[in-house]
Image (spheres, grey):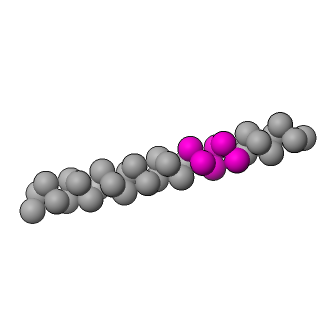
Amino acid sequence: MNKLKELNLVVLLVLNLLHLTNELAQMALHCGLC
């Protein structure tokens, strides 16, 4: 049960990082188009 909790935290962290990277990529793209 504890392992599942740890896995859940890792998944959330990865999703958070992906979201942040996506946001940065969109901003960079937007600035590149300006």
Split into 4 quadrants, where in the image is the N terminus?
Answer: top right
Specify the quadrant of the image occupied by residue 31. bottom left
At which x and y percent is residue 8? 72, 45
Residue 10 location, x and y as percent?
66, 42
Magenta-highlighted residues = 9-14
Measured as percent of width and height from the top left, residue 18 is found at 47, 47
Dividing the picture into quadrants, the one containing residue 4 is top right
The C terminus sits in image quarter: bottom left
Q: Residue furthest top?
A: 3
Q: Residue furthest left?
A: 34
Q: Residue at x 77, y 42 (%)?
A: 6
Q: Is residue 3 positioned above or below 15 on the image? A: above
Residue 23 belongs to magenta span: no
**Measured along the vertical axis of the image, is residue 2 above or below residue 31?**
above
The number of numbered badges drawn on the structure is 0
Residue 10 forms part of the magenta stretch: yes
Residue situated furthest right in the rendering: 1
Q: Considering only vertical position in the picture, is 23 above or below 8?
A: below
Question: Of helix, strand and loop, which mostly describes the magenta segment?
Answer: helix
Q: Is residue 26 left or right of residue 5?
A: left
Residue at point 19%, 59% (across, down)? 30
In this rendering, position of residue 27 left or right of residue 22: left
Residue 14 coordinates in the image, percent (x, y): 56, 44
